[in-house]
Amino acid sequence: MYIINDGMATNVANTLASHYNNLSTSTQRLSTGLRVNSSADDAAGLAIRELMRSDISALQQGVRNANDAISLIQTADGALGVIDEKLIRMKELAEQAATGTYDSTQRLMIESEYQQMASEITRIANATDFNGVHLLNGRLSGNTHSGSGITSTGKMKIHFGTANDSAEDYYYIQIGSATASSLGVGNEAASTAKAFTVSTQAAAQRALVGLTDAIVSKDKIRAHLGAMQNRLENTISNLTIQSENMQSAESRISDVDVANEMTNFVRNQILTQSAVAMLSQANSMPQLALSLIR
């Protein structure tokens, strides 16, 4: 029977500390909802989880990037719809000026409206922007992209993936110029352009051909934008599914199984209470030594 070094009490105290630590871990997991709260819980699991979380956040931002690109495309397409109305009116005016029932003075009146329509096309093309990025003035028509400067140049890169792989993480939006000079209509175009003027009957007849070409050019831009919008919508669907699956995988690694952990909690709680009771009994044992001194 020992007083200074009570092995029984020390053994029970060590057991109590172990049960108390387990109870503390269960309490933390149940309160946070996470199985892995620190690297001590699962070092490999923590590393995998943090990589997954970064990819999930990047994918969710990628979805927002793609949605922004769709908004940009819709802005450009809406402006092109207005330009389409102007081109149709210009063709109507060219058809009017091409007939022989009007004299030169009347054709000049038609010419005035014709050129105003052309100027309005240029104004719309120069004024259409999304978040400060001009869409229809030729800024995004380049074949190469450079993001090395403060302002990127050339075709627009839409980034939606978690890395920087050209096959998986981004592609480009390229929008041709829709100014009157680019479409070859009005007196802002080259003087050799077929739709330069409708001031004479012969010029008006040539303008009919030039305006048809301009409408086709504009329609090619709109068709390309429509195809890109469909592609972006499919990309968003894929990114959403990918993000959802990664969240499920991350959950299986880091989230706590509440039913299982609650069982552990109750067991550790009972063991802790039992150890406390036994430590109290062990601490009282050295008092029996007093009976030998009497």
Image: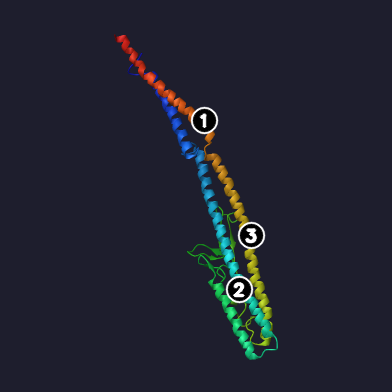
Secondary structure at numbered mark 3 = helix
User: How is colour applied across the structure in the image?
Assistant: rainbow
Q: Amino acid at mark 3?
A: Asn
Q: Given this view, does label 2 or label 1 mark the residue nearer the observer?
A: 1
Q: Is residue 292 above or below residue 134?
A: above
Picture coordinates of residue 95 (x, y %)? 68, 82
Relative to 212, is 7 on the left or the right? Answer: left
Q: Is residue 56 above or below residue 12?
A: below
Q: Residue at x 38, y 21 (%)?
A: 280
Q: Looking at the image, do the residues carrying marks 1 and 3 touch, with CB atoms under 8 Å apart? A: no
The 10 Å Cα crowd at callout 3, few under 14, some 14 to 19, many 20 or more, is few
Secondary structure at numbered mark 2 = helix
Q: Residue at x 46, y 28 (%)?
A: 269
Q: Residue at x 62, y 90 (%)?
A: 105
Q: CA distance from mark 1 to mark 3?
A: 51 Å
Picture coordinates of residue 91 (x, y %)? 66, 79
Q: Is residue 208 above or below residue 140?
A: below
Q: Earlier in the sequence, mark 1 or mark 3?
A: 3
Residue 230, label in figure: 3
Q: Given this view, does label 1 or label 3 mark the residue nearer the observer?
A: 1
User: What residue would you read off at disc 2?
Assistant: 83
Q: Quadrant where the N terminus lies?
A: top left
Q: CA distance from mark 2 to mark 1?
A: 69 Å
Picture coordinates of residue 253 (x, y %)? 54, 40
Residue 263, label in figure: 1
Q: CA distance from mark 3 to mark 2?
A: 22 Å
Q: Looking at the image, do the residues carrying marks 2 and 1 touch, with CB atoms under 8 Å apart? A: no
Secondary structure at numbered mark 1 = helix
Depth check, front residue: 261 or 184 = 261
Residue that sits furthest to the right in the current view: 100
Q: Quadrant where the C terminus lies?
A: top left
